[in-house]
Image (spheres, grey):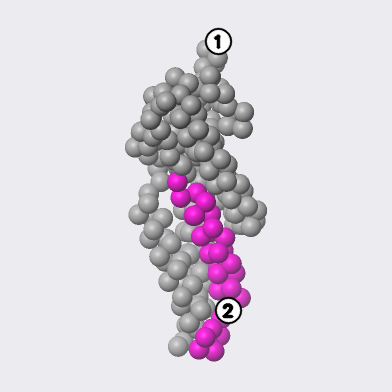
Amino acid sequence: QYRSTIEIVWSCLAIIFASTWICVHPNVAGYKTTLWQRLWKRVKLFLFAIFAPELLAVFAFFQWRGSRRLHRDFKRRAEEKNLYNLWTYTHAHFVQMGGIVFKGPDGQAGFQCPDGWDYEEIKDFFALQLPEAAISDRSKGSALAKTLVIMQVLWFTIQTIARAAEGLPITHLEVVCLAFTVFNIGMYICWWDKPLDVVY
């Protein structure tokens, strides 16, 4: 089957850029940041994913592992205080990414460090039993968009493997694209429950 160079380049670059842009989930940019500041933060993370996808995949894995550890901590603390635990992995990601803001005695807003958070400091927030839907309302992520991109990536992967099995040539760019899909799918899995572009 004949394929033009333009078709190969266009399809590969479209998959690389679309899948990478959808999969990057930056932490909260900061309190009262502008749209351009939040966009720039995501662009920087996107460029990092383009030039060093393996490093960002490792970073995503550590965030995934951290969210699981926080979720277990939430569950244990809820049992200790006889609270009904509504906290999910999304809540854990939300805390870890800087989604909770506290005001100090001077009235200045500040972020709670997720690695050293103290139950007594956030007990009122914890007792609110914040619904996951409330976090999702602040998130710009779309499960449908993620699913569509994953389906596109999987279809490209299947086609490439089928061409290799039939002995048809595969370009270097397609091999690079396959490598990106492996890292991006890993990041999709790690960040599936993480809110995207949360703003205050």
Quadrant of the snapshot with the C terminus = top left
Q: Quadrant of residue 133?
A: top left
Q: Residues within 10 Å of mark 2 (few under 14, many from 20)?
A: few
Residue located at (44% from left, 33% from top) = 199
- Tell me which numbered mark, 1 or 2, is placed earlier along the sequence: 1
Of residues 125 and 135, the one nearer the viewer is 125
Residue 179 lies within the magenta run: yes
Residue located at (58% from left, 78% from top) = 171
**Picture disc at residue 171:** 2
Give the vertical position of 16 relative to 47 (above or below): below
Residue located at (50% from left, 78% from top) = 160
Of residues 77 and 35, the one nearer the viewer is 77
Q: Quadrant of residue 145?
A: bottom left
Residue located at (55% from left, 74% from top) = 174
**Picture disc at residue 105:** 1
State the image coordinates of residue 79 (x, y, percent, origin top left).
46, 30
Mark 1 or 2, which is nearer the eye?
1
Secondary element under disc 1, as helix, strand or loop, is loop
State the image coordinates of residue 85 (x, y, percent, origin top left).
40, 33
Instruction: Identify which amino acid the numbered label 1 is placed on.
Output: Pro
Which portion, as a residue range, is magenta?
Answer: 164-193
